[in-house]
Amino acid sequence: NAGVTQTPKFQVLKTGQSMTLQCAQDMNHEYMSWYRQDPGMGLRLIHYSVGAGITDQGEVPNGYNVSRSTTEDFPLRLLSAAPSQTSVYFCASSYGGSYNEQFFGPGTRLTVL
Amino acid sequence: KNQVEQSPQSLIILEGKNCTLQCNYTVSPFSNLRWYKQDTGRGPVSLTIMTFSENTKSNGRYTATLDADTKQSSLHITASQLSDSASYICVAKGGGADGLTFGKGTHLIIQP
């Protein structure tokens, strides 16, 4: 049981490049979400999904896309990277929606030059 | 506006000592309050979840309290160990897209 896995662990992009951050969980959780964590700020919600085929925007969705084709995977796409997207990104999953305990992945540290 | 305020921002204590971290929240409607531990370079890990009807919950040397009337919670760490050095994040469930409002965390350093 690997829990929540994220790849890559580190990434450096140039402004304007696109990339996909991968997230997978093997706990059969229907609820998954993406957060970004910046110095001096709490985690902020980017996008979330209540189940396969259903996604919705969070607090800071601009510049990011998501899809949920399976229960296990929830990739986050940066369409055209900007320096403001330099951050640490965490994927999380939970059973029964956001009411219950969330399990977080190890994070992806992204730098946009 | 939903808010979670944590204090202190940072704290340094000696190994073996006890400490208490504070969390004040303003979320509506309130469902539950969580404490997470985040080691440097890792994702947050859940310590406790308490609903409005629970006053206290323990997880080993970690004890969380909740006062839903005053909208305050605390996390007490007993007999601190070097491995307790981490950021501790308070999260209130209520309001927002996924209903979760995160505090900025308290950075705890345990010195030998």
Image (cartoon, rainbow, N blue to C red):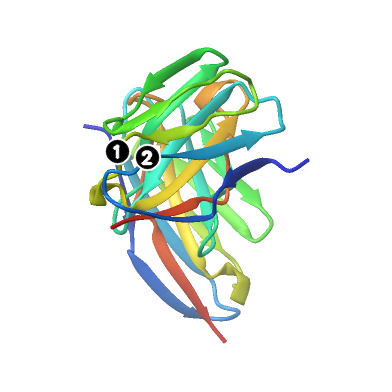
Q: Which mark is residue A80?
A: 1
| Amino acid type of the residue tagged 2 in the rendering | Ser
Q: Earlier in the sequence, mark 2 or mark 1?
A: 2
Q: Position of residue B46 (x, y in %)?
A: 58, 46
- Left or right side of A102 for A28: right
Task: Give the residue at x 30% y 47%.
Answer: A85
Of all residues, the one furthest to the right in this rendering is A1
Quarter containing the C terminus of chain A: bottom left
Location of residue A52 by image quarter: top right
Query: Can you give x and y, in whole percent of width and height, for residue B99 in the image?
Result: 39, 26
Q: Are marks 2 and 1 in contact (CB under 8 Å)?
A: yes
Q: Using the image, tell me which numbered label, if any, was put on residue A18.
A: 2
Residue under the image location 70 percent in, 25 percent down: A28
| In the displayed structure image, the side of residue A102 where residue A113 appears, left or right | left
- In percent of width and height, residue B54 lies at 55, 35
Label 1 SS? loop
Q: Quadrant of the N terminus of chain A?
A: top right
The residue lying at 63 percent from left, 50 percent from top is: B58
